[in-house]
Amino acid sequence: MFPKVLITGATGAIGPRVVSAMHHAGYRIRSFSVDEPPSGLFPTQIEVVVGDITDHKAVQSAMEGVDAIVHLAALLHIVNPPPELRGKYEHVNIDGTKTVVEASLNAGVRRVVLFSTIAVYGNADGKVLNETSPTRPETDYARTKLVAEQIVLNAKGPDGKPLGVVLRLGAVYGSRIKGNYERLIRALARNRFIPVGRGLNRRTLIYEKDVGRAAALAVSHPSATGRVFNVTDGKFHTLNEIIESICSAMGRKPPRWFLPVGPTRSLIGLIEKGSRALRLKPLVTRGMIDKYTEDIAVEGRLIQNELGFVPRYELETGWGETIEEMRKGGGI
């Protein structure tokens, strides 16, 4: 076990769960984030450093006395990002990772764990994907994360052995989630959601607390370095099953009706075009519909077989805890 671990992006959506899991696993933690953590976000024993991962001096300073690093900090995916964001994706996700790896090598860090995404696989074409499947990233986020993966996997210590481990996360859900699943929860809570399509498309998920446990394993396991692991709950879930689990956690019945995909997408396209002509931001886009109806089934058996990772949260328990915590926090 490496006693002291630096966690970048610790104040992000899943960062606090990773900090908590690593802390409970017995590691001494130093967090590194661009934002000061709110009071009470971390246990009192956590050492907090504020800085930017593209700032070489700040990152190098944060590496002092560190045995391993878990690199979460990244510019995350958004639907239909404007073209001008491409440079920012490259600066944060690629240049930031280079900075982290170079500082790790200079400081003698013995392991670098990168959080990546199953989005690097791109369109699954109805197939079940695993770590040997070809990567065909379709977004700036996925493309830059794939480059970041290679930076980490190419890093080697003084003995010539690899330092890096890549964790490709399924869609992470939990009480701090943002984006599509947050919008889905709020729409279901307000009875303002009508499904598009029959909901039989598959999704690959992982609950945020299980992500933290996977990170602790990747940091400590002797067989992890130089390898890529998909991190999932071990199952494929249809969109209907996800909606049913969320509604069950809310004490509501799931929607009974659905809209056909083709006509709905065409209508949204017309509304989207008209909104942009009026210089208005459309509430729903074709990109959102495509994301909602995509089918992606990614295996997570390798990390279970090789590192002994066992997901603790089923779909029902994960969403049940998510909804309960969001209610307590006033999120819904």
Image: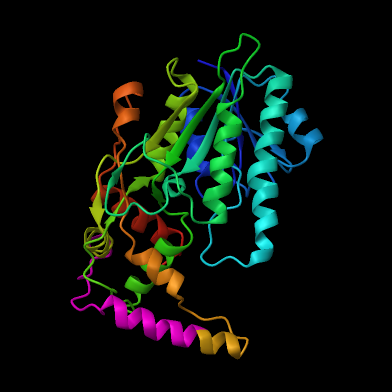
Residue 266, compared with residue 303, is above or below; it is below
Q: Which residue ends up furthest to the top in the rendered image? A: 159
Q: What stretch is highlighted in magenta?
A: 248-272
Task: Kindly identify the residue that appears in the image at 44 percent across and 43 percent down.
Answer: 135
Q: Main secondary structure of the magenta part?
A: helix
Report x, y in % for residue 311: 30, 36
In the rendered image, the quadrant that contains the C terminus is: bottom left
Residue 301, compared with residue 221, is above or below; it is below
Q: In which quarter of the image is residue 286?
A: bottom left
Task: Kindly identify the residue that appears in the image at 22 percent across and 58 percent down.
Answer: 241
Q: Which of 42 and 191 is in front in this view?
A: 191
Task: Kindly identify the residue that appears in the image at 22 percent across and 74 percent down.
Answer: 255
Q: In this view, does 15 lie to the left or right of 83?
A: left
Report x, y in % for residue 120: 46, 46
Task: Kindly identify the residue that appears in the image at 56 percent across and 13 percent down.
Answer: 161
Report x, y in % for residue 131: 37, 35
Residue 271 belongs to the span the image colors magenta: yes
Q: Which of 42 and 316 is in front in this view?
A: 316
Q: Is residue 56 left or right of residue 130?
A: right
Report x, y in % for residue 143: 55, 49
